[in-house]
Image (cartoon, rainbow, N blue to C red):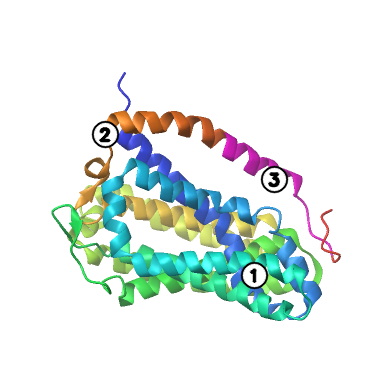
């Protein structure tokens, strides 16, 4: 049996991006919420909920970007010049955030400065991720096999909307993560924050979902024309179910893990919806994943490395989360 290597690698890249969004999303969200915690002991406690895992979470961003370059060089060569500005700004935000994360523990005089730097880096990185996503979804102008658009094509009302939506979404993930990892006053505050953010996120998902099909006729046909609509109709229903589970966990029963899992479900369902709109395009509206793929010999060689490395990454990620399970107490220790 011959392996469909382009399809396998498209799945691996999609998985890496989703893993990054899920794992790095909540610690970026904590950075976005960081200024709301005014006391130093609260900020220390909040930061220690992600201190053991935040660096490893970004492994998936490297895997996704590096995998795109190696497995789909044409897509990489088109997407990068089209989205240079937001992607470079995102990387600078991630670097600035990482520096601030480390330096705040090593100074007293400048600790407050690095705290706000951590928040700013998280906000900028998240906003640029969302804007880059919006720029990709709305389509990239390609002539031949090269980007043919302008420097500012990525900056539109739709891309700004997706940027703001991702900021709200990551903040919700951060708030629900803190519900799981803390107790007392911080947890109570996060229940209230998550309640408000959940309403905003569901509204944003609705607006983006209604806007997206009208960006391209193929998106519209994929979602609303028969017989496609018979397959896509359950997606909005599942989003509403996830939103209801999130609401019940936050409001009626004050569950701890349920809101976080429900928030993750909203992200996963939104990601699947994005995949439904894109398929089989990797760079809408012109380049499919098969057009963008490297030769099969290269993909096969790369797959050997992926088969070895992916289980290792998954294993140490799972081990880290297992070791540092439980809540962070007032002394910033795990129990």
- Residue on which disc 3 sits: 320
First along the sequence among labels 2 and 3: 2
Q: Report the residue marked by disc 1.
A: 100
Mark 3 crowdedness (10 Å alpha carbons): few <14, some 14-19, many ≥20: some
Figure quadrant of residue 79: bottom left
* Label 1: how many Cα within 10 Å (few below 14, some 14–19, many 20+): many
Q: Main secondary structure of the magenta part?
A: helix
* Residue with the most extreme right position: 331
- Element on which disc 3 rests: helix
The residue that appears at 62% across and 37% down in the rendered structure is 315
Question: Which numbered disc flags the more N-terminal residue, 1 or 3?
Answer: 1
Q: For marks 2 and 3, give the one nearer the viewer.
A: 2
Q: CA distance from mark 1 to mark 3?
A: 22 Å
Q: Secondary structure at mark 2?
A: loop
Please state the horizontal and vertical placement of residue 32, each as a whole percent of the image: 59, 72
Q: Would residue 157 appear left or right of 55 to someone viewing this image?
A: left
Residue projecting furthest to the top: 1
Q: Is residue 294 left or right of residue 308?
A: left
Q: Nearer the viewer, mark 1 or mark 3?
A: 1
Query: Label 2, on which residue?
Result: 295
Q: Is residue 155 above or below residue 282?
A: below
Q: 7 and 146: which one is in front?
A: 146
**Residue 113 is one of the magenta-drawn residues:** no
Label pair 1/2, CB-CB below 8 angstroms? no
Label tally: 3
């Amino acid at each position: 049996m011959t392996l469909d290597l382009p399809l396998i690698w498209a799945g691996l890249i999609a998985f890496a991006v989703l893993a990054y969004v899920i794992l790095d999303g909540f610690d970026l969200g904590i950075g976005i919420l960081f200024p709301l915690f005014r006391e130093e002991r609260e900020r220390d406690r909040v930061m220690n909920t992600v201190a053991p895992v935040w660096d490893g979470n970004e492994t998936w961003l490297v895997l996704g970007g590096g995998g795109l370059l190696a497995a789909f060089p044409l897509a990489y060569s088109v997407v990068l010049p089209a989205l240079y500005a937001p992607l470079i700004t995102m990387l600078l935000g991630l670097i600035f955030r990482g520096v601030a994360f480390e330096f705040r523990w090593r100074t007293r005089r400048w600790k407050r400065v690095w705290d706000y730097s951590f928040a700013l880096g998280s906000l900028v990185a998240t906003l640029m991720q969302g804007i880059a996503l919006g720029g990709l979804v709305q389509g990239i102008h390609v002539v031949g096999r090269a980007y043919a658009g302008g420097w500012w094509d990525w900056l539109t009302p739709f891309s700004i909307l997706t940027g703001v939506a991702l900021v709200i979404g990551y903040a919700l993930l951060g708030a629900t993560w803190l519900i799981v990892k803390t107790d007392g006053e911080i947890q109570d505050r996060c229940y209230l924050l998550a309640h408000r953010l959940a309403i905003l996120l569901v509204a944003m998902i609705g607006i983006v979902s209604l806007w997206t099909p009208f960006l391209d006729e193929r998106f519209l046909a994929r979602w609303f024309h028969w017989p496609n609509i018979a397959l896509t109709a359950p997606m909005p229903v599942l989003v509403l179910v996830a939103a209801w589970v999130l609401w019940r966990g936050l409001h009626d029963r004050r569950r701890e893990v349920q809101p976080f899992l429900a928030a993750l479900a909203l992200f996963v369902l939104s990601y699947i919806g994005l995949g439904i709109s894109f398929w089989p395009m990797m760079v809408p509206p012109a380049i499919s994943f098969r057009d963008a793929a490297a030769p099969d010999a290269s993909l096969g060689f790369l797959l050997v490395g992926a088969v070895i490395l992916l289980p290792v990454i998954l294993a140490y990620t799972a081990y880290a989360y297992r070791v540092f399970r439980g809540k962070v107490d007032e002394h910033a220790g795990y129990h």
